[in-house]
């Protein structure tokens, strides 16, 4: 995946990331969960791991 595609997905809320001091950080938990899902099912939809605003 290209860097531009990843940034677009982050801005669209389709990929989990938070902004810390001007940099995007992907939570390790999200990566671990995506890896486990990929190993179990072979396909991962990153949108399922996108961060939701607190209500």
Image: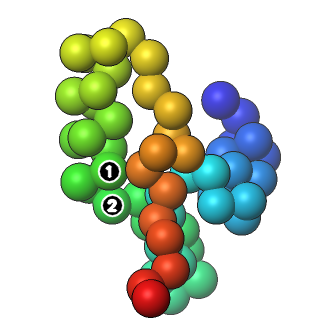
Tally of marks:
2
Q: Secondary structure at mark 2?
A: loop
The reply to whether residue 12 is in sight is: yes
Residue 42 pos. (x, y %): 37, 11
In the picture, measured across the screen, residue 16 lies left or right of residue 12, that is: left
Residue 13 vs 9, above or below: the answer is below
The reply, left or right, for residue 5 in relation to residue 53 is right
Mark 1 → mark 2, Cα distance in angstroms: 5 Å
Disc sitting over residue 27 in the figure: 2
Pointer 2: residues within 10 angstroms few (<14), some, or many (20+)? few
Q: Is residue 7 visible?
A: no
Nearer to us in this view, 49 or 3: 49
| Residue 51, position as x, y percentages in the image | 46, 65
Residue found 76% across the figure and 53% down from its top = 8
Q: Position of residue 37 (x, y in %)?
A: 29, 26
Q: In the rendered view, would you say 5 is above or below 40?
A: below
Residue drawn where x is 71% and y is 64% of the image? 11
Q: Which residue is located at x 47 percent, y 45 percent?
A: 48
From what the image shows, is residue 34 above or below residue 55? Answer: above
Mark 1 and mark 2 in contact? Answer it, CB < 8 Å: yes
Q: Quadrant of the C terminus?
A: bottom left
Circle 1 is placed at which residue position? 30
Instruction: Report the side of 30 relative to 29 (left or right).
Output: right
Residue 18 point in image, percent of width and height: 48, 73
Rendered image quadrant of residue 44 = top left
Nearer to the camera, 39 or 48: 48
Residue located farthest toward the top when viewing the structure as drawn:
42
Classify mark 1: helix, strand or loop. helix
Q: Quadrant of residue 41?
A: top left
């Amino acid at each position: 995946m290209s860097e531009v595609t990843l940034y677009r997905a982050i801005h669209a809320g389709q990929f989990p990331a938070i902004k810390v001091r001007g940099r995007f950080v992907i939570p390790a938990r999200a990566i671990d969960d995506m890896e486990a899902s990929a190993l179990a099912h072979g396909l991962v939809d990153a949108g399922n791991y996108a961060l939701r605003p607190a209500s």
